[in-house]
Image (cartoon, rainbow, N blue to C red):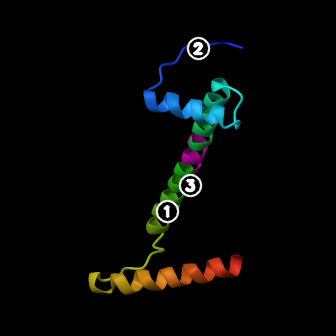
C-alpha cells in the first residue's frame, strides 16, 4: 500500500488522536481513509444533485418553449407560490 506524508493542523492532529484513543479507529491511517471515503461520498451526492438540477432546468426550458407555463402577475406571485407549496406537500403525503 502506498504511503504519503501529510501535514495536519494542531486541531486536526488532536482530532485524529482523539478518534484513535476512543477505540473507534485502530490508527491514524484508518481515520484519514474514512475521511477520504466521506469526501468521495459528498462529491458523488453533489454530482447527483447537479445532474438533477441540470435535468430540471432543461425540462423547464423545454416547457417554456412549448408554452407549458403560467404567467403570474407580480402582486399574485406569493399566493401562487403558496398554492404550489400546498400542492407539493399533498403529493409528498400521498407518496409517503
23 above or below 50?
A: above
Q: Residues within 10 Å of mark 2 (few under 14, many from 20)?
A: few
Residue annotated with mark 3:
52
Query: Which dot, 3 or 2, sits closer to the camera?
Result: 2
At 48% from the left and 74% from the top, the residue drawn is 68
* Element under disc 3: helix
Residue 1 included in the magenta stretch of the image? no
Q: Is residue 34 visible?
A: no
At 65% from the left and 81% from the top, the residue drawn is 93
Query: Which dot, 1 or 3, sits closer to the camera?
Result: 3
Q: What label sits on residue 88 in the rendered view?
A: none
Q: Are marks 3 and 2 in contact (CB under 8 Å)?
A: no
- Tell which circle, 3 or 2, labels the residue nearer the N-terminal end: 2
| Quadrant of the image occupied by residue 76 | bottom left
Find the magenta span and give its range: 43-48
* Element under disc 1: helix
Residue annotated with mark 2:
4
Does 33 sit left or right of 51 as displayed? right
| Quadrant of the image occupied by residue 24 | top right
User: From the image, which quarter does the N terminus lie in?
Assistant: top right
Q: Residue furthest front?
A: 21
Q: Is residue 70 visible?
A: yes
Of residues 77 and 41, the one drawn nearer to the viewer in this rendering: 41
Residue annotated with mark 1:
62
Of residues 60 and 44, the one drawn nearer to the viewer in this rendering: 44
Amino acid at each position: 500500500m502506498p504511503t504519503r506524508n501529510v501535514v495536519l493542523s494542531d486541531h486536526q492532529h488532536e482530532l485524529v488522536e482523539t478518534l484513535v484513543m476512543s477505540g473507534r479507529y485502530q490508527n491514524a491511517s484508518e481515520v484519514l481513509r474514512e475521511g477520504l471515503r466521506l469526501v468521495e461520498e459528498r462529491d458523488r451526492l453533489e454530482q447527483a444533485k447537479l445532474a438533477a438540477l441540470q435535468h430540471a432546468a432543461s425540462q423547464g426550458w423545454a416547457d417554456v418553449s412549448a408554452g407549458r407555463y403560467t404567467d403570474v402577475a407580480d402582486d399574485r406571485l406569493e399566493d401562487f407560490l403558496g398554492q404550489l407549496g400546498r400542492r407539493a406537500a399533498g403529493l409528498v403525503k400521498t407518496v409517503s
